Image (cartoon, grey):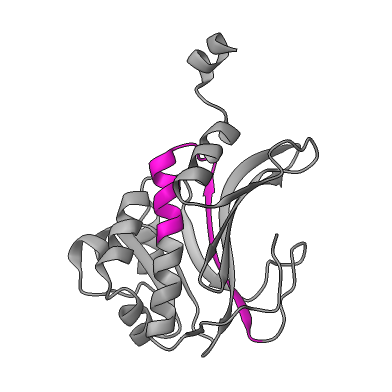
Amino acid sequence: MGFLINIFGPSKDEIWGLLEKEINATLLNKDSFWHESKVVLEHKNWTIILDVFRRSSGKSSMPYTRMRCAYINKDDFRFTIYPEGIFTDIAKYFGMQDIEIEDKIFDDTFVLKSKNPDKIKALFNDENIKNAFLALKDLTQFQVKVQDDEGFWGQRFPDGVDELYLETLGVIKDLEKLKIMFKLFAEIMDRLCEIGSAYEARPSINLT
């Protein structure tokens, strides 16, 4: 076993077990063969969930690490953020929206999309949130968004309930990045309440 660890590094559940202890969360399904493990953190009245899912493409499938948090959306404010890429300039040329928040480093690093530019600027008027995003910018196919459900194959949400959602390609076993992901979600949820876009109440849905 030690030989395999030297080659492949610690397993996901080993790292996620450390994460559980360091952020005072709960690791579920760690001994289950049929179900992926999850790290669940209670932050105020919200439940933040980290897990892994697979997305099929033809005959193969790829693992993605994701984080989710359901909440009561007060004003239908939604957004999407992801790092700038090689095709971003082309997309902007053809009219793709990219809201700037007047922070050059951040604006040069990320694409921000929302139907409410004023709210997105208010959300990111927070150094902790911006620093957390910058610390995660190198994750592969990284994106964070607010969505109103999980799509055709996913869970449907009650009226007024949305989901803060993060995904990135691969299984994340970097303990520091995992801690930053949880910190980012906690900061965003607190900030959404501050700008009047979320209720600090428990939503009537269970994502676990």
Q: Residue at x 74, y 73 (%)?
A: 156
Q: Residue at x 76, y 66 (%)?
A: 152
Span highlighted in magenta in the image: 160-183
Q: Is residue 103 among the parts visible in the rendering?
A: yes
* Residue nearer the viewer, 64 or 90: 64
Say above or below: 167 vs 138: below
Magenta stretch contains residue 90: no
Please state the horizontal and vertical placement of residue 148, each as a whole percent of the image.
63, 76
Q: Which residue is drawn at 33% across and 65% down?
A: 129
Q: Quadrant of residue 170?
A: top right
Q: In which quarter of the image is the C terminus?
A: bottom right
Magenta stretch contains residue 182: yes
* Residue nearer the viewer, 169 or 157: 157
Q: In this view, does 208 lie to the left or right of 200?
A: right
Q: Is residue 94 among the parts visible in the rendering?
A: no
* Residue nearer the viewer, 3 or 164: 3
Please state the horizontal and vertical placement of residue 96, each as a whole percent of the image.
42, 71
Please state the horizontal and vertical placement of residue 91, each as a whole percent of the image.
41, 64
Q: Which residue is drawn at 71% across and 73% down?
A: 205
Say above or below: 122 vs 187: below
